[in-house]
Image (tube, rainbow, N blue to C red):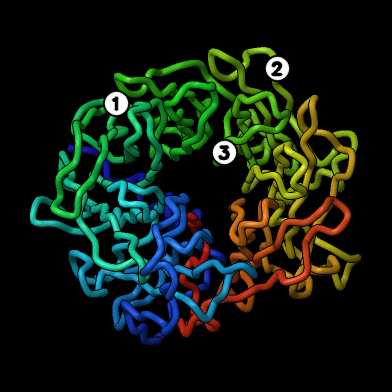
Amino acid sequence: MPSTRTFRTTLATATATAATTALAAATLAAGTLVAGAGSASAASAAPSGLQGDFNGDGYRDLAIAAAMGKVGTQAAAGYVAVVYGTSKGLDPTRRTIISQDSAGVPGSAEKGDYFGNALAAADLNRDGYSDLAVSAPEEDTAEGQAAGTVVIVWGGAKGLSGATTVPNPQPLYGSYFGASIAAADFTGDGKPDLAIGAQGDTSPSWKIRLVRGPFAKSGARGKLTTYSSPVDNPVLTAGRVTKDSAADLVVQGRKFDKYILGPSVFYKGSGTGLVKGGTLPAGTNAAIGDLDKDGYGDIAIGNPDEPVNEPSGSKGGEVSVVYGAASGPSSTRRTTLTENSASVPGVSEYGDAFGASVAIGDFDKNGYGDLAAGVPGQSFGADPDRKLYAGEVILLRGSAKGVTGTGARALSQDTPGVPGTNEGIDSFGARLLATDINRDGYADLSVVASQEDNDAGAVTYLRGAPSASFPATGSTAFGPAALSRPTAYSDFGGRLAG
């Protein structure tokens, strides 16, 4: 019997914003489709095939999870808000709200399912529209309590609608199927696959289930392979490190039966599946992208933990960068950054949580990937009026030599062009995602302020621009209220995909 102690405790710790936060009584009309969410032109034109373009109009969209959101009367049932992209960026008036009460989505919204705990976007049935894999790891099934479920919500000309369940190969009590998800072509055959974290009935209990594509609305899918996870409750990040056709996987988590982080582990994609490679610095999150324009993907690993709790961590948090090479991550070309590093804005202070989130994107369109690191614990001002934990994002530019401090920026809600105002306990920078939503060649940055507006949470969309001009005019911010959702704490933005 797998242990049931790990998942619920880990999720509650990671998403709770304060010990006194409670889910207020509010209703949620599940399955709402706002008029205009689909693209009128998409129906008559070929779909784009872009990852994250759920309606095929050529603009990437953004899926925002609220895994602790209330659906009807069901607390923490969870929902996903999908905001569609346009030539001007994200448009919150064009959106779809998906829950297990939505038409065509298997199951029903129930208390504590955490629908939206993990998200991943890819064209899983290869019809030219990106699809969205969504998990509810606390879902109770006939086979067992908290067996968990993963569904694929299908893209189409009108956006996301309908869904198909991905079979849980071992639906045990406490298997938490879907604790983490990554979508990519791990076998290099041109068919996107799903890597799914879950518990099993053999030691070590946590597993990685590789479900090969293509997936079909009928429920058909490819071969299943199970790997033992090297860490407890694995966090999965997909990307292409080598120059071959197969995507690779970074696995992160804590050591079994211990609070401290274990080393991150690299798995190389291949025609036979995932091949375990070397270890990487410990961390809680990762991003993969080409920082030095050499054609190899580089790995940024965020570790916000303090040394008192995490022996491998740094005061105020750290970000490790491991550069890619022909065989995978380099064993020698590695660097660790803190706020005390040369040319990195700021000073390392306890509680900053530098590296709580990382993202890589070419924000200034110069061909080099840039590194964004969230610092949601950053405080501003002097006592007694300090704006505690307002949060910020540090932006470091890429170059032929990799990450450089030249042109580094610290962005907060008081930065010109960034919507909003610094306020205490906003936690701006808690989550990050880099995608070119408006298709102008500049990567855009979506930033989550997990405790904005008294724990409601918010997403700030920052449009890419030349270095000195970032963010561009047209950046915007919105929370659940702008999407006609309840403003009680819901972990809005706890996961992003697009």
Please state which of residues 253 and 122 is positioned toward the viewer in this rendering: 122
Image check: 454 left or right of 226?
right
Q: Earlier in the sequence, mark 3 or mark 2?
A: 3
Label 1: how many Cα within 10 Å (few below 14, some 14–19, many 20+): some
Residue located beneath label 1 in the image: 227
Image check: 269 left or right of 425?
left
Q: Please say if 146 is above or below 191.
A: below
Residue 19 at x, y percent in the picture: 53, 67
Q: CA distance from mark 3 to mark 2?
A: 17 Å
**Residue type at the position of mark 3:** Ala
Within the image, what quadrant is residue 214 found in? top left
Image check: 6 left or right of 342?
left
Please state which of residues 39 and 299 is positioned toward the viewer in this rendering: 39
The residue sitting at 40% across, 86% down in the picture is 26
- Dot 2 falls on a residue whose secondary structure is strand
Residue 332 at x, y percent in the picture: 68, 13
Res. 351 visible in picture: no
Q: Which mark is residue 333?
A: 2
Label 2: how many Cα within 10 Å (few below 14, some 14–19, many 20+): few
Q: Earlier in the sequence, mark 2 or mark 1?
A: 1
Image check: 452 left or right of 110?
right
